[in-house]
Amino acid sequence: MQRHRDQGPTPSTILTRAAFTNAARAVSATAGSTNAALHLLAIAHEAGVEFTLEDFEQAARTPVIADLKPGGRYTAAEMFDLGGSALIANELRAAGLLLDGATVTGRTLFTELDAVPKPAPQDCVFPVARPLKPRGGYSILYGDLAPEGCIVKLAGHGRDHFEGPARVFDSEDAAFAAVQSRAIQAGDVVVIRFEGPAGGPGMREMLAVTAALVGQGLGNDVALVTDGRFSGATHGFMVGHVSPEAAHGGPIARLREGDRVRIDVATRRIDVDADLSTREPVRIAPRVAGGALAKYARDVGSASFGAVTSPPPAPKPTRIALQLLDPEPAKQTSDALPA
């Protein structure tokens, strides 16, 4: 508040396109959670900054340079003790992958990094020229099942293609029961729908199902596709944030048991061998009838745009506001009435 009183930086000064690009690249460099796509898209929306899923795809080409759990050796707290996020920022800067900009201190990001003491030798964060992996742990896909996009988690399984019959469930609970009863087989594509922002409502994480699949030794032998999301602790071939979601009548609501689903990371496609346009979407009754969650389910938009509940901010009324405060005198025209 003191800095703001002294004409310091405001949120709109800091939340620039460059700042969001830096954040998305940092997510990739740390093999961070796919949930970052939702959060950063939502923040960018509120800040009035154009930032899309395709910007995340570009950022995902940033190599993984931090050896962090759950796939690596160090926790975030241990990395903090070794030098923290400045370790990552300095390596990205050295590789030309970090953009300068304003910070909350009033100084630029690069100025802040220049002031960081030189860290002791460590083996948690590596140079971009010697990465742990050549790209981040996620990719953005489109296709028959996700015209607005979805996100596939790449970390932990090393596969870039999966094809199999759809096993379709209208809730996480139903899918979990099927896994527990050993009704899921190797090669299946487990589809969990009506768990998106509106359908859930709230887009809960599919951690129980993925944990049960791993517990049965199927973690690397099945794929999971959902309009919900999954935890950073999940393992396996996971596709989340499928948009439009089932509750909004998206193609995933037209999928049927046994339809053959094809996921291809190289071509960035997720498709199905069926003409979904000839089918009516499945509908289920709303899970919440009243209160704040019902209002959220009614107003929330697509996960591919951050699952926000408001329209884009209006343009800043700069010139218009000035004209309202100090309007120009009306010009006399030939057909104007005399005074």
Image (cartoon, helix red, strand yellow):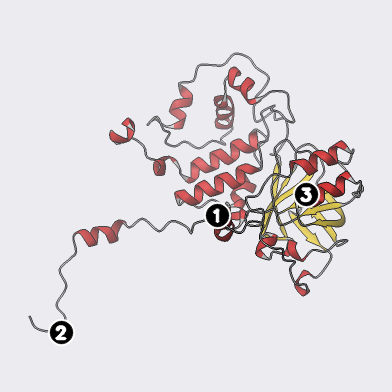
The first of marks 1 and 2 along the sequence is 1
Give the residue number, with chain letter if any, for mark 2. 334
- Which residue is depicted at the point 66% across and 60% down? 286
The spot of residue 165 in percent (x, y) is 88, 57
Q: Amino acid at mark 3?
A: Asp
How many angstroms separate mark 2 from mark 3 (CA)?
A: 75 Å
Circle 1 crowding by C-alpha within 10 Å: few under 14, some 14–19, many from 20: few
- Of residues 219 and 332, the one nearer the viewer is 219
Give the number of the mark in front: 3 or 1: 1
Q: Secondary structure at mark 2?
A: loop
The first of marks 2 and 3 along the sequence is 3
The spot of residue 241 in percent (x, y) is 68, 52
Give the quadrant of the N terminus: top left
Q: Secondary structure at mark 3?
A: helix
- Which residue is depicted at the point 58% across and 41% down? 24
- Of residues 158 and 226, the one nearer the viewer is 226
The answer to whether 86 is drawn above or below residue 17 in the figure is above
Circle 3 crowding by C-alpha within 10 Å: few under 14, some 14–19, many from 20: some
Q: Amino acid at mark 2?
A: Ser
Q: Secondary structure at mark 1?
A: helix
Give the residue number, with chain letter if any, for mark 1. 291
Q: Amino acid at mark 1?
A: Gly
| Rendered image: mark on residue 173 | 3
Give the quadrant of the C terminus: bottom left
The answer to whether 5 is drawn above or below residue 226 in the figure is above
